Image (spheres, helix red, strand yellow):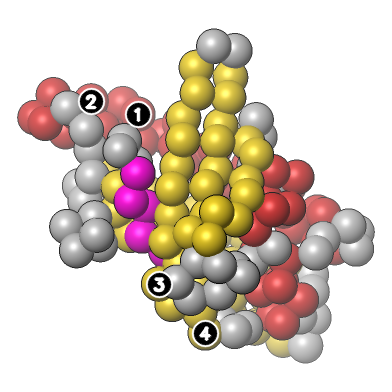
Amino acid sequence: MRAAAQPGAGEVTATVIVAAPAPRVFAALTAWERQGDWIPFTRVRLVEGDGGEGSLVEAVTSVGPAVLRDEMRVVRMDPPYEVRVVHCGRLLRGPGVLRCTQMDRDRTQVVWHEWFHLPGGPAARLAWPVLWPGSKVGLTQALKRFARLVEQGRLP
C-alpha cells in the first residue's frame, strides 16, 4: 500500500463547475455505489467499510470483452472538501483526490486528480503522451455527466 500511495508518472486532472453547494456535491461524489451512474461502463461497490476512511471500493469497467478492475482504499475524508484514495489493485495503482471548492452559495468547483503508476515500464512512459488525452477527455466527460445529475437532483 505504501508504494501505491506514491504518485506515479501518469498524471491526469479534470475539473467541472457544479451548480450546487459543496456539501451536496461532496455527498454525491462519495455515494460510491452511484458512481456507475456517471462513469461510463462502470459498476462500483463497497467491498469493506461504510464508505468512509479505511473503506475499500471496487470499480469494474467493462467494454465488450475488456474488463478493468480498480480497487481503491479511502485514505482521507474531509467533508465537504476532499476525499483521497489510493488505487491499490493489480493494474491500477497510485493516489487520487476529489476536491470540492465552494465558489459561492450555489456553485462548487470539483477537481479530480489522479497520479497513476504506469504498468509496462519505459514503454508505458513513452505511450503516456498518446494515452493522456483520452484519459483527460474521459474524466472530463464523466464529471460533466456528474454535474448534470447533481443539478437535476438525481444524485446523490
Mark nearer the viewer, 3 or 1: 3
Mark nearer the viewer, 4 or 3: 3
Q: Is residue 40 left or right of residue 59?
A: right
Q: Position of residue 152 (x, y in %)?
A: 91, 59
The type of residue carrying mark 2 is Ala
- The numbered dot on residue 131 is 1
Q: Secondary structure at mark 2?
A: helix
Q: Residues within 10 Å of mark 1 (few under 14, many from 20)?
A: few
- The numbered dot on residue 75 is 3
Range of magenta residues: 85-89
Q: Residue at x 24, y 59 (%)?
A: 1
Q: 88 or 16, which is in the foreground?
A: 88
- The numbered dot on residue 78 is 4
Mark nearer the viewer, 4 or 2: 4
Which tag, 3 or 2, sits closer to the chain's start?
3
Magenta-colored segment: predominant secondary structure: strand
- CA separation in Å, label 3 and label 1: 27 Å
Q: Secondary structure at mark 1?
A: helix
Residue 98 seen in this snapshot: no
Q: Position of residue 58 (x, y in %)?
A: 52, 47
